[in-house]
Image (cartoon, grey):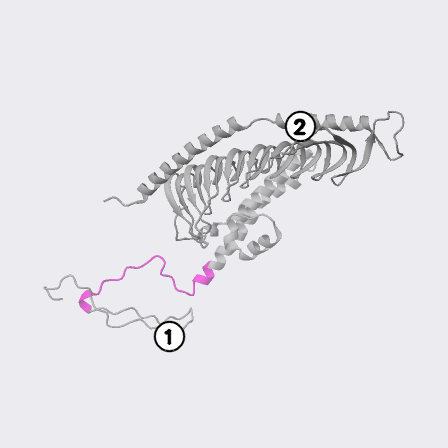
Amino acid sequence: PSPSSPHKRPLLTHTYTYSSPSLSKSNYELPIYHRHHRRPCRPSLFSVSTAVKPFLFRILRRVTHLRLLLFSLPFLYFLVSHPTHSFLLDSLSAFAFSAALLFFLNLALPRLPSIRLFLARSLPIKLNVASSAASSPLPVLWSIGSFPKPPISGCLVQVFSNGDVYEGELNKGNFSGSGVYYYSMSGRRYEGDWVDGKYDDYGVETWPWGSRYRGQYRQGLLHGFGVYRLWSGGIYAGQCSNGQSHGCGVYTREDGTWYVGEFKWGANHGLGHYHFRNGDTYAGEYFTDKMHGFGVYCFANGHRYEGAWHEGRRQGLGMYTFSNGETQSGHWQNGTLDVPSTQNTVYPVSPVGVYHSKVLNAVQEARRARQKAYDVGKVDESVNRAVATANRAATAARVAAVKATQKRLPTV
């Protein structure tokens, strides 16, 4: 080789050729190097002719079979040569023989594929063979992605796909604390307390058409004491449950009339007194927004009716007193007197007459109902306290919204 290139590898001038698949005759030709790079070949321990290899394999197989048989014979002899052994000793011998047999089968299985196939199909157990180490490894599964992000906590601004916007506090990904929510479709706005993603505790809710509620919430609905101002001018101040007036409260209509008393799922129901715009008043029992039961109706001109009512009309026993002191008593039907009462305590004047004493009992019931209606629990103090707390909660929500907006803005 040239002195200027001492590190160059010798060039290959020929490649090997394979002419016959026979094991007994091989026409392999080694690569021929340049003569000055040829190295002497060292004899290898495994350079045995291919014709001898099958013979060696057969000998090794026979040796394996013989080894298995020789190791099994002592245990078999120990088991059958002493028939007088006890049952425990026979059991131990059988167990030792079986263990030895399985152990040597485990060693011989790599060289006995037929037995390995037979055991794999017949036995429910899986033997550990030496060839398992050479078997293909289990596939490795790879995935491209990212770990799930932990729930967010703190103050931030969240914009939804429908255009709704929340600004305020979050706890583990849920609206919790103080915050402001704006509904883009309806224009509704809520400022106040949140628990687990819903209005809860105190807050202020405003509608674009002018309605507003200040008070208590639970699970996203009006619940507790509060004041609800309608866009039409009506005002409800009192208790709510599941989004409706329920309990004791005061409802003032836009026409100037008002009702003070008990409510049930948005309707006047129970005891209460109603003040009409023309000056008339009613105090007594209500059923689903109608005078029903016993009550007293006082007219602005001084007339008065005391007795029974049915779905807003005078019906049953009652007495009508005029402003000059005259009275009409008896049984009323659809607002008119159909059967007058009589003062006779033994027999009525007519067979269809009504005892006056029964009418007086109905009048007493109506007067008691009126007194109970005026004694219905007052809610002014509770409502005022709830409104004040709701205003503070709304202020805290606006402060949290400002913090969330400032956190969102990029720093200069």
Judging depth in this view, the residue of 8 and 385 nearest the camera is 385
**Whether residue 373 is situated above or below residue 198 in the rendered picture:** above
Q: Nearer the viewer, mark 1 or mark 2?
A: 2
**Whether residue 62 is situated above or below residue 407 in the rendered picture:** below
Q: Secondary structure at mark 2?
A: helix
Tell me where residue 89 appears, x and y as whole percent. Answer: 65, 34
In-image side of 210 versus 271 (left or right): left
**Whether residue 228 is situated above or below residue 43 in the rendered picture:** above
Cα separation between marks 1 and 2: 123 Å
**Whether residue 158 is situated above or below residue 273 in the rendered picture:** below
Tell me where residue 203 appears, x and y as whole percent. Answer: 46, 36
Q: Magenta residues?
A: 35-56
Tell me where residue 14 appears, x and y as whole percent. Answer: 26, 72
Total marks shown come to 2
Can the viewer see residue 336?
Answer: yes
Q: Residue shown at 57%/49% (left/top)? A: 69
Name the image quarter holding the C terminus: top left
Q: Secondary structure at mark 1?
A: loop
Based on the picture, tell me whether residue 36 belongs to the magenta stretch: yes
| Sequence-earlier tag: 1 or 2 | 1
Judging depth in this view, the residue of 290 and 184 nearest the camera is 290
Based on the picture, tell me whether residue 45 belongs to the magenta stretch: yes
Query: Which label sits on residue 370?
Result: 2
Picture quarter containing residue 91?
top right
Judging depth in this view, the residue of 198 and 316 nearest the camera is 316
Can the viewer see residue 242?
Answer: no
Query: Which label sits on residue 19?
Result: 1
Q: Residue shown at 36%/58% (left/top)? A: 46
In-image side of 325 versus 273 (left or right): right
Can you name the residue that lies furthest to the left here? Answer: 4
Amino acid type of the residue tagged 1 in the rendering: Ser
